[in-house]
Image (cartoon, helix red, strand yellow):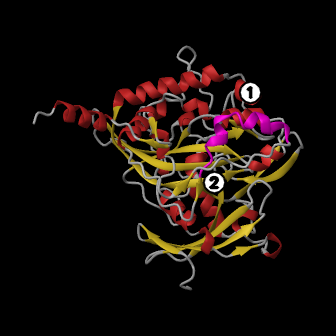
């Protein structure tokens, strides 16, 4: 292999970033080919894509045939598992590999779609006879039940109706059409309470910075964190005595193109961007989980609607609540659903820990006010919003945490500084010190 090809070895498996194909699909513009091998595994190739609704998280790419009753035809769509599969977690690319991809995007060769041979992994049905064995095996691995850890309290989240024990398969992207915001939040609140009764936070650790453009509507500047939790009462032979929950904490700012040409969703987008930050949990596993040759996690813990996205589809089959479908629309396809995660364990506690212990280093960043066009209807509205003052631009290379400013409590001399409990204590001790 050429030394110019970015490669990384994770859990004994080597992954090479071969090429990016542009304009693969109108909604998923870039797909990335990866080759993998190890001492005991023969080389294979597979494709990954960036999920819009998950703010650009890389997921395993494979198409399948789905029957559309509206058009009475069979269509090619991204394969997202079966009814028992938590597709958000089942198709998520291992975060160590994701981080490597993000850090090396500018080193990967780019190929236009018109030059792309029509045998790529993403342009073939999962069950098509013309597909290779790898494509079929990829589908098998995605729905592989051996990857799933079903234990209390995570397996109880779907048991949301105590009176009738209704078993509607609620989950990320699976919302009963009659559900409103209160129905969704009640399920999450019950789960959060059960989670908190059984687990305690051991550690909250920073993984990597994560910046992306969401369908030319908003920019997301965020960070990926991992919360390690232990059971308060250990269970014999349990796979979940220690669990790892990954979440994204991000700031959203409006794309300049949307300001210049506002859509009917501009007000909703502005309200979303006015929030100080956004947070959503996107993956849960245990310590024994390792990377597979297809870049996936070997283990994950289904958590129903608790593990999801920041945006979801409001069209087609209901994936949003009634209110989200009406009042949270941010584009023709997507509604904002991040409000679901307000005040949930362990997210709320994790943020509090970060605000207490995070070290602030803003030397690599500047915060200029964006250049706002004054001749658009949206300009007057936008310039009066907090979002207009919260766009962050890197000087050169991003080398420090970009959202530590979420945790600042006071402003001195035009600079935001941390007002921590430790600082308060030091001042008090200094004041009471006798000479």
> Where does the C terminus fall, quadrant-wise?
top left
Viewer-nearest residue: 57 or 318: 57
Residue 246 falls left or right of residue 47 = left
x then y, percent, for residue 426: 24, 37
Circle 1: is it few (<14), some (14-19), or many (20+) Cα within 10 Å?
Answer: few
In the displayed orientation, state which residue is furthest to the front.
Answer: 435
Report the disc number at residue 292. none
Q: What residue is at 56 percent from the left and 19 percent from the top? A: 161
x then y, percent, for residue 41: 48, 74
> Where does the N terminus fall, quadrant-wise?
bottom right
Give the secondary structure at mark 2.
strand
On the image, numbered disc 2 is attached to which residue?
212
In the displayed orientation, state which residue is furthest to the bottom.
Answer: 2
Relative to 305, residue 81 above or below = below
Residue 421 falls left or right of residue 298 = left
Which residues, given as a range, are shown in magenta?
376-392
Q: What residue is at 48 percent from the left and 72 percent from the top? A: 8
Report the disc number at residue 327. 1
């Amino acid at each position: 292999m050429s030394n110019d090809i970015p490669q990384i070895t994770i859990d004994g498996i080597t992954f090479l970033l071969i090429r990016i194909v542009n304009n693969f699909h109108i909604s998923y513009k870039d797909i990335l080919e990866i080759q993998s091998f190890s001492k005991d595994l023969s080389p294979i190739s597979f494709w990954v894509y960036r999920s819009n609704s998950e703010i650009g998280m890389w997921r395993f790419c494979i198409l399948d045939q789905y029957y559309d009753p509206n058009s009475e035809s069979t269509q090619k769509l991204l394969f997202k598992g079966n009814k028992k599969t938590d597709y958000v977690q089942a198709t998520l690319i291992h975060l160590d590999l994701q981080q490597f991809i993000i850090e090396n995007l500018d080193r990967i060769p780019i190929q236009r779609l018109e030059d792309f041979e029509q045998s790529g992994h993403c342009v073939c049905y999962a069950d098509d006879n013309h597909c290779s064995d790898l494509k079929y095996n990829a589908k098998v691995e995605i729905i592989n039940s051996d990857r799933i850890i079903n234990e209390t309290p995570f397996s109880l989240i779907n048991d949301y109706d105590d009176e009738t024990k209704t078993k509607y398969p609620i989950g990320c992207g699976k919302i009963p059409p009659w559900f409103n915001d209160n129905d969704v939040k009640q399920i999450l609140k019950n789960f959060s309470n059960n989670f908190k009764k059984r687990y305690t936070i051991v550690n909250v650790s920073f993984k990597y910075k994560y910046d992306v453009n969401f369908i030319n509507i908003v920019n997301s500047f965020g960070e990926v964190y991992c919360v390690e939790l232990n059971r308060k009462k250990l269970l014999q032979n349990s796979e979940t005595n220690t669990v790892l929950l990954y979440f994204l904490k991000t700031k959203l700012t409006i794309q300049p193109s949307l300001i210049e040409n506002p859509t009917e969703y501009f007000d909703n987008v502005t309200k979303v961007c006015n929030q100080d930050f956004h947070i959503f949990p996107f993956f849960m596993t245990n310590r024994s989980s390792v990377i597979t040759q297809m870049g996936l996690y070997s283990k994950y813990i289904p958590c129903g609607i608790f593990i999801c996205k920041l945006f979801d589809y409001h069209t087609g089959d209901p994936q949003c609540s009634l209110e989200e479908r009406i009042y949270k629309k941010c584009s023709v396809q997507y509604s904002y659903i991040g409000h679901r995660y307000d005040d949930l364990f362990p997210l709320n506690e994790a943020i509090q820990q970060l605000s207490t212990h995070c070290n602030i280093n803003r030397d690599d960043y500047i915060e200029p006010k964006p250049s706002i066009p004054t001749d658009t209807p949206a300009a007057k509205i936008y310039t009066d919003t907090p979002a207009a003052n919260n766009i962050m631009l890197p000087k050169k290379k991003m080398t420090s945490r970009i959202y530590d400013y979420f945790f600042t409590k006071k402003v001195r001399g035009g600079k935001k500084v941390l007002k921590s409990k430790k600082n308060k204590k030091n001042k008090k001790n200094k004041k009471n010190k006798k000479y």
